[in-house]
Amino acid sequence: MTDNTLMNIAHIVAKESKCIRAKVGAVIVKNKRIIATGYNGTPSGTDNCCEENNVTKPEVIHAEINAILNATTHDLQGAQLYVTMSPCTVCAAHIVQKGITTVYYSKRYTGNHDGIPYLKRHNVLCIFLSQSNLEPIMFNNPKRNNKFDDFDERFDSTFNKIKNTQLALGIFWALVGMAKILAIIYIAYLVYNYATMP
Ligand SMILES: [Zn+2]
């Protein structure tokens, strides 16, 4: 998968967030495979509400940390992180701790705890990917596809019928041709017999 596709996936994951102020999505990739995803929110089973008086509650878990928590069974040494908004310092510390080596982000976090300088100081490659252009997803319309399948099937059967008819006609005309040749030979034989009659 390309970096752009992975960033698009992070953007789709972000839509799952119930937070109002910011919806962030993260995807962890290792050896070109998605290991885990995460989005920002309160712990599962709690109130599912991120803000209080339009201020983000301290218990909201950031997308990056949720993704790391969702990848507990994996060794993240050398993994890549795709996140829709660049990490804060707390997330950056977790990223360094887990040995993630590259962070792709499509929007720079503008708060007081920008994690990018921290990541760079600890040799984590930080790559900006321009705000991903999500193309509308073309869902398969089963009805329409069936129609096309039916059409193809009907077309195939008609085509086969035509082919079979042509084959039958071909054999028929070949037999007619052979009959003609036999008739000519027989007539020639009769003429020869008649001519050589004593
Ligand atoms: Zn964070």
Image (spheres, rainbow, N blue to C red):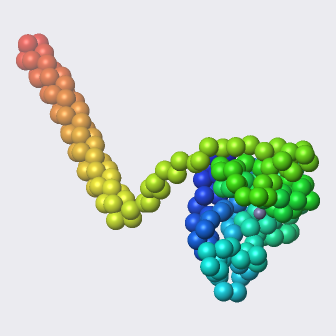
Q: Determine whether 188 is above or below 178 in the image.
A: above
Q: Quadrant of ligand 1?
A: bottom right
For residue 31, say whether it is visible.
no
Query: Going by the image, does 29 lie left or right of 177?
Result: right
Q: Position of residue 175 (x, y in %)?
A: 22, 35
Identify the residue at image location x=58%, y=71%: 20
Q: Which residue corresponds to the image point at 14% horizontal and 19% vertical from the top-left?
A: 188
Q: Which quadrant of the view contains residue 178? A: top left
Counting from the top left corner in percent of width and height, residue 47 is at 66, 86
Q: Position of residue 124 (x, y in %)?
A: 86, 47
Answer with left or right where residue 121 lies relative to residue 85.
right
* Residue 83 image position (x, y, % from top left): 70, 56
**In which image quadrant can residue 172 be found?**
top left
Quarter assignment of residue 53: bottom right
Q: State whether residue 53 appears in this view.
A: yes
Q: Quadrant of the C terminus?
A: top left
Direction from residue 185 to residue 57 in the image, left or right: right
Give the left or right position of residue 8, taking residue 174 as reference: right
* Number of numbered markers: 0
Q: Residue at left 70%, top 43%?
A: 128
Above-or-below relation of 79 to 56 = above
Image point (65%, 49%), residue name:
106
Closer to us: 37 or 118? 118
